Image (tube, rainbow, N blue to C red):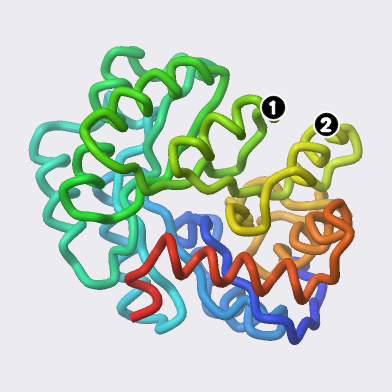
């Protein structure tokens, strides 16, 4: 694995990484060591099935700077059975579980029936409202579907969550923030062709913005050819966000860290 050393003394938190991925097997300890040099002080490892959620919880027990989110990704809902969901509910009670998800909807991939995805998205939203844990939303080519379900859930009570690796437009971002959600950006915001997405990021209030890698996917510019993506690379995404908002990296980082602790409050305890 080629991994350029990144030195940064400004604290950052990667709010969305898949450290359980087999792409990190055999190199995970090295990857986590590199995060320290890059100023990544904490990470949330995101579950996509009951098995990966269990592995994320295990990693959080081994590495003190790693926390877990537990859930079933929309593209894995066809592989889930009722007892799998029961296990997610039980895992959400573990102290190192700081969120539920990755959940949401996906019309791009034809892996799972859409009504099944909606069922599981609704389960995650209800679990979030029952436990007080924030939820993490995956959205691909289904903006209106996501909004309709979020607005329905909002009728039951307040929402606490984040639109992860956001790629929507300003109208979508505004509607999500009106519902109480945070907006998180990953490596795609750094890509040269994504000027429109950077324009959206420029207009997200500092009080509602988060930063992530979605590693091992979406390596940021100028490291797009480097695989796997890793939390240390997030410095480039954070710097891009600071640049488009025309503020120092330290100010952007301080706000994202504060926002992370406000949303994922179990991390602050």
**Mark 1 crowd level (few <14, some 14–19, many ≥20, 10 Å Cα):** some
| Badge 2 element | helix
Mark number, residue 196 = 2
Whether residues under marks 1 and 2 lie with C-beta atoms below 8 angstroms apart, the answer is yes
- Please tell me which residue is depicted at 42% across the width and 25% down the height of the picture: 105
Who is closer to the viewer here, 120 or 248? 248
- Please tell me which residue is depicted at 45% across the width and 64% down the height of the picture: 44
Q: In the visual, does 175 lie left or right of 247?
A: left
| Badge 1 element | loop
Who is closer to the viewer here, 219 or 186? 186
Which quadrant would residue 180 be assigned to in this image?
A: top left
The Cα atoms of the two marked residues, 1 and 2, are separated by 8 Å
List the residue tagged with mark 1. Answer: 169
On the image, the x and y values in percent for residue 6 come to: 80, 77
Identify the image quadrant of the N terminus: bottom right
Mark number, residue 207 = none
Who is closer to the viewer here, 217 or 208? 208
Q: Is residue 146 above or below residue 165?
A: above
On the image, the x and y values in percent for residue 102 come to: 39, 43
On the image, the x and y values in percent for residue 183 come to: 58, 45
- Please tell me which residue is depicted at 41% across the width and 47% down the height of the picture: 161
């Amino acid at each position: 694995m080629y991994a350029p050393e990144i030195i940064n003394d400004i604290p950052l938190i990667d709010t969305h990484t898949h450290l359980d991925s087999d792409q990190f097997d055999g190199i995970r300890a090295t990857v986590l060591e590199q995060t320290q040099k890059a100023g990544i002080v904490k990470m949330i490892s995101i579950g996509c099935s009951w098995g990966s959620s269990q592995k994320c919880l295990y990693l959080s027990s081994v590495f003190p700077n790693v926390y877990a989110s537990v859930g079933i990704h929309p593209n894995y809902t066809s592989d889930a059975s009722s007892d799998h969901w029961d296990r997610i509910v039980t895992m959400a009670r573990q102290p190192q579980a700081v969120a539920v998800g990755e959940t949401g909807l996906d019309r791009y991939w034809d892996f799972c029936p859409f009504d099944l995805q909606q069922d599981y998205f609704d389960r995650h939203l209800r679990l979030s409202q029952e436990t007080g844990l924030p939820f993490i939303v995956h959205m691909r080519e289904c903006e209106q579907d996501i909004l309709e379900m979020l607005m329905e859930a909002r009728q039951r009570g307040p929402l606490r969550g984040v639109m992860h690796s956001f790629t929507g437009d300003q109208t979508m971002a505004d509607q999500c923030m009106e519902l109480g959600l945070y907006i998180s950006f990953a490596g795609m915001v750094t890509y040269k062709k994504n000027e429109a997405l950077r324009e959206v990021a420029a207009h997200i209030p500092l009080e509602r913005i988060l930063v992530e890698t979605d590693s091992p996917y979406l390596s940021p510019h100028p490291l797009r050819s480097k695989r796997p993506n890793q939390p240390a690379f997030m410095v480039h995404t954070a710097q891009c966000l600071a640049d488009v908002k025309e503020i120092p990296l330290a100010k952007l980082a301080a706000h994202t860290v504060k926002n992370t602790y406000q949303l994922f409050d179990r991390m602050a305890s």
